[in-house]
Image: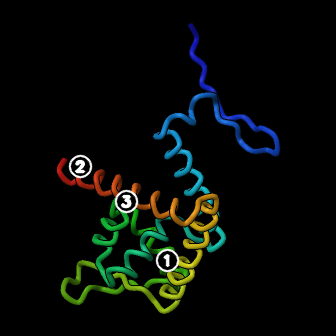
Amino acid sequence: MESRKRKPRAGAGGHLVEPAGLESSTGYLLARVGTESRRRWARTLVELNLTPHHYSALMALGHEGAMSQHQLSRHVGIDPRNAVPVIDQLESAGLVDRKPDLTDRRRYAVTLTGAGTAVIGELRHLALDAERELLAPLTAAEHQTLHGLLTRLFRAINQDSAGA
């Protein structure tokens, strides 16, 4: 028997109608909501000429302060060779500075500029707006419950991967 993949189809009003039965799968729903959240956030970043890697790098520098390119690549979760173009783009945009590390001249230290710090403030505001929009169908109590459950799952996953 030939297997066919069922794709979501557009229903009334252009909204996607999921294949029958998938809404009963929690994993599927988590994946779909996550995909929609990422799609919306990526669209917001594009409006600022940023990518998710740019965002991660800026937020890591904003939280941790100056660090080497290698440390930044680990924080962002990308290969150090792939971090160089990300840092180059942020530097060209005036959002970060890259200077030789004073303790090890073979390394470069990456720091936020004033403009980079301002962009982080704007990104935090936009992230809150995007979250509010995505979670608007939930009550405050439901939002709090969802956050607590997702936090528990997130910590369990991180614990599992730390022990692996």
- The answer for how far apart the CA atoms under marks 1 and 2 are is 34 Å
Where's residue 43, x and y in %?
A: 64, 63
Decide which of tag 3 and tag 2 comes sooner along the chain: 3
Quadrant (top left/top right/bottom left/bottom right) for the N terminus: top right
Please name the residue that numbered disc 2 is placed on: 160
Closest to the observer: 59 or 9? 9
Pair 1/2: label in front: 2
Q: Earlier in the sequence, mark 3 or mark 1?
A: 1
Q: Residue furthest top?
A: 1
The amino acid type of the residue labelled 1 equals: Leu
Q: Position of residue 157 (x, y in %)?
A: 30, 51
Rendering quarter of residue 57: bottom left
Q: How is the image coloured?
A: rainbow
| Secondary structure found at label 3 | helix
- Per the image, the residue denoted by label 1 is 90
- Residue 148 lies, with reference to residue 18, above or below; the image says below
N-term-proximal mark, 1 vs 2:
1
Q: Is residue 148 above or below residue 35?
A: below
Residue 19 percent coordinates (x, y) = 64, 30
Residue at position x 57%, y 16% in the image: 3
Give me the C-alpha separation between circle 3 and circle 2: 14 Å
Instruction: Characterize the local packing of mark 1: few (<14), some (14-19) or many (20 or more) Cα atoms within 10 angstroms.
Output: many
Residue found 30% across the figure and 65% down from its top: 74
Give neighbour class at mark 3: few <14, some 14-19, many 20+ (Cα, 10 Å). few
**Looking at numbered disc 3 in the image, what kind of residue is underneath it?**
Thr
Asked whether the beta carbons under mark 1 and mark 2 sit within 8 Å of each other, the answer is no
The residue that mark 3 highlights is 151
- The secondary element bearing badge 2 is classed as helix
